[in-house]
Amino acid sequence: EVQLLESGGGLVQPGGSLRLSCAASGLIFSNYAMNWVRQAPGKGLEWVSAISGGGVGTYYADSVKGRCTVSRDNSKNTLYLQMDSLRAEDTAVYYCAKAPYSYVIGDNGMDVWGQGTAVTVSS
Amino acid sequence: DIQMTQSPSSLSASVGDRVTITCRASRSINSYLSWYHQKPGKAPKLLIYAASSLHGGVPSRFSGSGSGTDFTLTISSLQPEDFATYYCQQSYNTPFTFGPGTKVDIK
């Protein structure tokens, strides 16, 4: 069974940094693109970033471009999201979600999701 | 960026009802459209991908249709476990975008 487990969330002051992790199991991790999706309290889903299976292709939402960096370590089956210059509007639950293929763009959807990790940006 | 809209934003229905939710893209996305549902405090779950393909393990009462800019999710006979919020999402181009959601609750 494929499982994704996020960690690294917490309370951080505005302007601070945080690195989220997503540990994957039950799959050949490098075969699949991965996404980060967030959900602010009481709000809808917002796609944040994606990375191809090999890690070469990376993509970002305008709201985080220049402040966030997505990466992966396929030897550790782990996805990361480095978040810098955090703002109050980054407060959300952050989910990692797997694509069914190694490429990011396609008609495939996100077929497995983690349980999420909560990030709160507040002084 | 491609904008996604959904209608209605919420609906009340009874067990056994047929429910239809509409999603519209601001420009053509071919069939690069997925549907998810989410229950409070839980992660979203994939229902439909490629506009009309049923994800593995999803009951056949769920179906999707459409291409281009207009899409529909239909639940043929609403079950108690289907009360949730439903989102569409385009994967035609980045930034990927979700619709604002449709909350389905009990009448």
Image (cartoon, coloured by chain):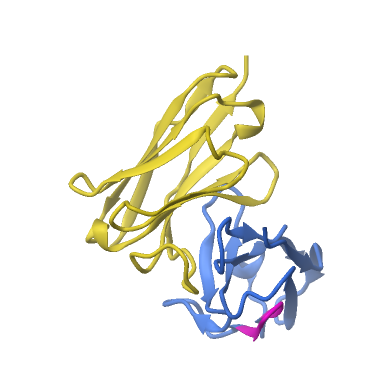
Residues drawn in magenta = B64-73
Q: Position of residue A73 (x, y in %)?
A: 25, 44
Q: Which of A96 and A64 is in front in this view?
A: A64
Q: Residue B107, can we see it?
A: no
Give the left or right position of residue A96, taking residue B51 as reference: left
Of residues A87 and B40, the one nearer the viewer is A87
- In the figure, the shade used to draw chain A is yellow
Say left or right for B81 vs A116: right
Q: Residue at (56%, 74%) from the top-left corner?
A: B32
Does residue B86 sit above or below A15 in this rendering? Answer: below
Q: Whole-percent x and y of residue B77?
A: 67, 83
Q: Determine the image quadrant of residue B51.
A: bottom right
* Chain B, chosen colour in render: blue
B52 to A4, vertically: above or below: below
Judged from this view, the residue extending furthest toward the left is A75
Q: A30 or B100: nearer the eye?
A: A30
Residue B46 in sight here: yes
Q: Where is residue B72 in the image (x, y as percent from the top left)?
A: 70, 80
Apparent side of residue B34 relative to residue B87 in the rendered image (left or right): left
